[in-house]
Amino acid sequence: MAEYLASFLGPEWQWIAYAFTAVFSCVLLLALVVTAAAAFTWAERKVSARIQDRLGPTRVGRRFGWLQSPADGLKLLCKEDLIPAAADRFLFRLAPYISFCTAFCVFLALPFAGGFVALRLNTAAFFILAVAGLEVFGVILGGWASRSKWSLYGAMREAAQVVSYEIPLGLCVVIPVMIAGTMDLVAIGNDQAGWFWNWYLFHDPFTFVTFWIYVTCAVAGANRLPFDMPESESELVAGFMTEYSGFRWSVFFMGEYASMFALSGLGAILFLGGWNGPIPVVALIGDGVSLTGGLVPVPDGRTAELAAVFLGNLVGMTNFILKATAGVICMMWIRWTLPRLRIDQVMTTCLKYCIPLAAAMLLGAMLWTYTFPGGVLGALRPAPSAAVDVPSRSHAPHGNALHGNALSRRFASFRGSTFQASGSHAEHGNQVDHPVAVAFRSRQEN
Amino acid sequence: MPAERLDSGTVEVDVATDEMLLNMGPQHPSTHGVLRLALRTDGEIVVDVTPHIGYLHRCAEKIGENVTPRQWIPVTDRLDYLAAMNMNLGWALTVEKLLGHEVSEKTQHLRVLVAELNRIASHVVAAVCYGLDLGSFTPFVWGFREREKILNLFEELCGARLTYSYITPGGVTHDAPGGWLDKCDDFLTQFAPCVDELHALLTSNAIFVRRTAGVGVLSPAMAIDYGCTGPVLRGSGVDWDLRRDGESCYTRMYEGYEFEVIAETGGSYPNDEEYPPVPPAAVLGDSWHRFYVRMLEVVQSMKLVRQAIEKYRNTEGEVDKPIKLKQKLPEGEAYLETEAPKGQMGFMIIGDGSSVPWRVRARSSSFCNLSVVRELCRGVLIADVVAIVGSMDLVMGEIDR
Amino acid sequence: MKIENMLKQLEDRYGRWITGSNAEVIDPWIEVAPQRLPEAARLLRDEPEWQLNMLHCITGVDYFEPDEKKAAKVDWQPHVEVVYHLSSMVHNHRLVVKVMLPRWKDGVEGQLPELPTVSDVWSTAAWHEREVYDLIGVRFTGCEDLRRILCPEDWEGHPLRKDYRQPPEYHGIKTG
């Protein structure tokens, strides 16, 4: 988008285009995150209610109470701004914003679809992990600045828990990165295009187990039950959030739901195929169109191609949001079912179970990928004919031939298409690599 | 009279720089009422716990010296308000012991019915609130849903949901209305699967077991020494239940009823093949066993209610009405303990010839159960204090009176 | 063994510290001299025939009639009774132990009567004794932590005494 706008401006005014794009992306993401937080609050109340054999909000907003979240938000905005007399005022005010901003920053690098990513980084996975880890500062500051012993306990527990669980989380993330050969999340997502068995979840048994370890670490990283010691309601009232009320509390709250959504989305990209649906509809339709021998009129031209690509991205984004939402709902489901672990049991789970297991899975996945490059299915599928010529991805550090073979097998389903994984197009986003574009072009060539 | 000197035991002062003084309560989500636990902690490890009570003291015993026994019944309701029927029963039996009064058999069966139904309600609340303390929100709502049905039954019987004032010295205030016994039967039928659900969510849950097994192990000798009674005592393996072992004026109410006393004798619980197995990590006398005893007692109470319904239906005669409001009490003392859900609840009445007692005393089980918390909580984590206090099933109403 | 025989046996064996008994009443009791209480408690707990290992309750009763006309009719002198309800889980029998104390020590109003503690015999006695101290006003010597339990720590007076007058204010809050 930035380049498109910049093309209208002179050399000195290029920056306006980029600034506008940046602001536009941020606003869009902020709107998305806040809406997601509101929606998840509603979902939490409804899910928890149904699990507990009751209804949840049913008054505000007709039958399903969907206006409850905006109503609560409005109420929180109108609340009295309370700061404890002994609290450190500056840090007290600062803490929720740190928490929220770090949770929000994760979305900058998180792709919602092949072409929908605010900032396409080739170290996206690393960036996300690093930024998500900063959230703990907001919590510690909040607990410390409240000058309440209970809040301090919550903060200390949070520090221990989140920082410890970052290690197995990182190990779990390394495995898909290793399989894909890149930290670029867009590339990892595209790598899983096709049928659902291309998803890394089914790549090999070690990755399958890793997914479940990832789920555990994500729940711990998001401070959800059974790992919600930092804000355990029945012990610490609300842990580090005890002294927060009104808008500040809602910022913390939004940060928590944002991080839940982000971790869930990250898991979806890394293991569940991201924005790819279980059935490669687009590729099949593309073939179907060519099969009908041109009876179905499809417009030609660059604009049509862009529109089709946009539509494809939209479908992909829907897929991604559905998967991430399913992950969040699962987190809610777990929360309302299980009791919470004591802090030393939380640490034991991390240090004695998650880390060794994740490390073992890493080793296993490494050996498996070396032995069976295409994963389980790559091992089962016969070698393709020489018709497919697939250059290795430009992002892969060494462009090893093994990796190229894996990709070639996976994209063999795009019949007869020549896949241009071009480095030059990468800066413009992945639009031309999108399966829709590919199918489009293949139809044009036929 | 000079005020007592404030010593360092009453006013906590932060003397050691390593230790932190933490106040759990009196307003706290998991101290089961207005209980203040002053914790001295070294990081997360608790060095000492000092319970402070008296926030709910409502001068019940002083009131008892100014009103007649029948007028004191609403005060007994508010002692253990979760099991008000049992409180009423204890007081009624004590006054009847002083008067030498015996109620008819039909009245006794009705008393057993409501007392055991209230025991179910009380144990369900104890169990699910324990789960709530440990972070399990869903069983709490499910348990309260079932308890609501019991409360509806009681409302139909005597007009009140929580403070019944139903069992009075001399009898009960109302006879069971038509169709009420069938409703009790129906409730029990639909309640049995819910117990299994609670077992699945709590008793057998791995995280619940990790939080409660081995936590707050109370030896039988210490339990008796500290006067612990009820599920706390039976959870330590002491086979003692006043419904079987108590005074005759109480045990005759349960004559002819078949029920098991839930305590681990000879290494196993009675009929244990019907219930989830004891996990290997659980030690006799720990919080898990106290919880387990309550869950199993619910089933025994269900049996008792069914038997009471049948016996009531088959007994001829009328249900006794209460004694006169200004019944003159003979001179003398009577003390009686009954097996309330939380433990042994004792009432003492000293009559002086007038209609108003000279002295009234309520001895609550939670009072003694709380006194042992200090010993159990040395060297545990803060989260374990919550687990231990929750397993004691305290009600501040009866501790503070 | 019937309770009358048991009480007779106690009196025969320990007559020096049993100053009274009554087996005819609803709850048979023995009366023990105050200074002999800890010794008696230990014997009652450890004696094989008794083994009264559970202390249920300690109750303080103030026998004082503030109304002069009624005071003339009663057949007891003003005193404070401390009543111990004991039972044995081994033999399944019960016993009540009473101790008679003067209302004020040495007759001086304001000085609380004293009684040795039994909390080293039955640990539960500690809290019950705190309650008796709080509400009736009996000082238990040897108790390591004797402070009020139900009333606030700085409360004045002992509410369950018959001549108790409620203070009009507590820290500026009206009490009645």
Image (cartoon, rainbow, N blue to C red):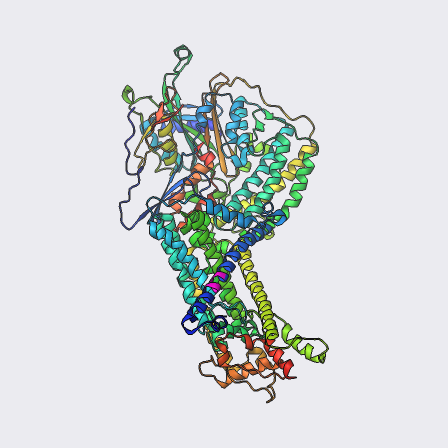
Query: What residue is shown at x 54% (from left), y 69% (from top)?
Result: A113
- Please state if B234 lies on the left or on the right of A46 as rendered: left
Q: Is residue A205 magenta?
A: no
Secondary structure mostly seen in magenta is helix
User: Could you say which is closer to the camera, residue A346 or residue A93?
Assistant: A93
- Number of marks in the image? 0
Q: Is residue C125 above or below residue A366?
A: above
Q: Is residue A326 above or below residue B318?
A: below
Q: Quadrant of the C terminus of chain A?
A: bottom right
- Please state if B229 lies on the left or on the right of C20 as rendered: right
Seen as rendered, the residue at the extreme bottom is A386
Q: Is residue B167 above or below residue A347?
A: above
- Please state if A404 lies on the left or on the right of B153 as rendered: left
User: Could you say which is closer to the camera, residue A44 or residue B220?
Assistant: A44
Q: What segment is highlighted magenta in the picture?
A: A23-27
User: Residue B368, image x and y in percent?
Assistant: 43, 38
User: Could you say which is closer to the camera, residue A2 or residue B153?
Assistant: A2
Residue C83, picture quadrant: top left
Seen as rendered, the residue at the extreme front is A10
Query: What residue is shown at x 41% (from left), y 48% (from top)?
Result: A244
Q: Is residue A24 magenta?
A: yes
The answer to whether residue A47 of the structure is visible from this angle is yes
User: Residue A359, image x and y in percent?
Assistant: 44, 71
The answer to whether residue B256 of the structure is visible from this angle is no
Q: Is residue B282 above or below residue A13?
A: above
User: Residue A189, image x and y in percent?
Assistant: 53, 72
User: Residue B96, image x and y in percent?
Assistant: 55, 25
Residue A169, picture quadrant: bottom left
